Amino acid sequence: MVVLALQTGAATAAPAPHPSGARAVALSAPARAAALESARRNAGTAARELGLGAREKLVVRDVVKDADGTVHTRYERTYAGLPVLGGDLVVHAAKDGSLKGVSKATKARISVPSTTAAVSPAAAKQTALKAAGTAKATAATAREVVWAAAGKPVLAYETVVKGRQHDGTPSDLHVITDARTGERLYSFEAVDTGTGTSQYSGTVPLDTTAASGGYDLTDGGRGGHKTYDLNGGTTGTGTLFHDADDLWGDGTVNNRQTAAVDAAYGAAVTWDFYKAAFNRNGIAGDGRAAYSRVHYGNAYVNAFWNDSCFCMTYGDGANNADPLTSLDVAGHEMSHGLTAATAGLKYSRESGGLNEATSDIFGTSVEFFANNASDPGDYLIGEKIDINGDGTPLRYMDKPSKDGASADYWSRTVGRLDVHYSSGVANHFFYLLSEGSGAKTVNGVSYNSPTYDGSTVTGIGRDKAVQIWYKALTTYFTSSTDYAGARTGTLQAAADLYGQGSAEYNAVAAAWAAVNVK
């Protein structure tokens, strides 16, 4: 690891070639603002054309424009002024404005008999606090909503319980309570977590900013990303890293800057990967940087993304010896922000597994993109840090069950698993789509990926596979997408990018069948 000096430009290798056609084009900040404003002005017309009820309105979240002129407008929905959770949809319009299709989180008609709750907000809060269980609650707020993510839409409360999870991770637990009966309908955690490696990126370039008496760890070329030292704290922003000579860290945990180096480098590489692969300008596509916080808590063995602060946070690992700030972890955590800004996959059940898998897929892709000799790309998650105590990685994409808990294939019960384990189905799909089944060696690592039905899958390469996943995530997935929906979305994305019935399209179908999603 690491003596760092100020360098400008990309912190990564040159991008690989990628497809055009249905790829999203990069919109400048003014162009994106204009597209959003146009969509807002036309939201009423869009609602009528979609046949929505008189009490429904569309609220614009995002607009994506493809190179061929197709426009994908992502909307949230309201009913009688109440947010509709699970009512999000994406409208796909051709260059001439004609409707090509709609991707909906729910096909149910949005209607409730009354918007007057029979259960009090206080009662809903008590239900939510009970659901939080071992979480150390510090606050709870309830709002009236329409819950449409499962079955018939009902009037409900969404209560957010803030506090701490059992391992010290912040908790923003969302609990949905039926406003008529008081029954708990659903719950999901909004703080997305993950684990990985650190201190293995070697000597890397950083962009810093001149400041009084030296330099701040602020990357002005990538939206102003800042890296802060929490110094063992668990709240607030911390102190911005500053250095007199612009030489950062020494590769050991004894130097507090070392973890900051890894975090800042990982953020820069991930930003560059998004730009090179997808023409995306930052996590939210608006040129705005997130920020990173390191040295969270004491011996905290995790890292997490929190959308409320638009930031990544990293612990120092067991015995404060291995900060969780490696390249694949940074890519993983930032990609939770990408998911929040696009499909908004709820962090529970099958959609939560897809959320986690998306971060593993992009975190792995970032690692390959960096082409860093000190940490070569692989299909292992957390391979550099010995959390298990036996030298094994946390997760395996070629055969997820090798970790002892993850699912290789879809089953009716997969959504009952922790989201880090239900993610195995999509991780396995992505590996098969990229590399194919059977025994092979990639960057010195041996893999042997099985299939559910004994079929042989031929991979199309990681570059094409990640294009298909990104296209599906940003234009076809919704908040409640499950594995069946992911199959539909990725097939549509493959058709957009490479053509219906193309080799890539057929490979997507074959890879899903190989993980028992049909």
Image (cartoon, helix red, strand yellow):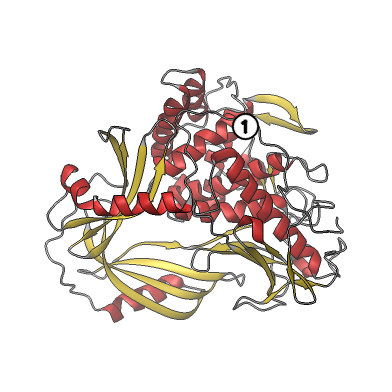
Apparent side of residue 437 relative to residue 77 in the rendered image (left or right): right
Apparent side of residue 393 relative to residue 304 in the rendered image (left or right): right
Residue 217: image location, x then y, percent = 72, 66
Q: Quadrant of residue 231?
A: bottom right
The answer to which of 101 and 508 lies nearer the viewer is 101
Residue 79: image location, x then y, percent = 20, 60
**Vertical placement of 495 versus 229: above or below?**
above
Q: Is residue 417 visible?
A: no
Label 1 residue SS: helix
Please, what is the three-letter code of the amino acid marked with disc 1? Arg
* Placement of the C terminus among the 4 image quadrants: top left
The answer to which of 391 and 10 lies nearer the viewer is 10
Residue at the spot 43% in from the left edge and 34% down from the top edge:
487
Q: Which residue is mark 1?
A: 462
Q: Quadrant of residue 500?
A: top left
Residue at the spot 44% in from the left edge and 45% down from the top edge:
413
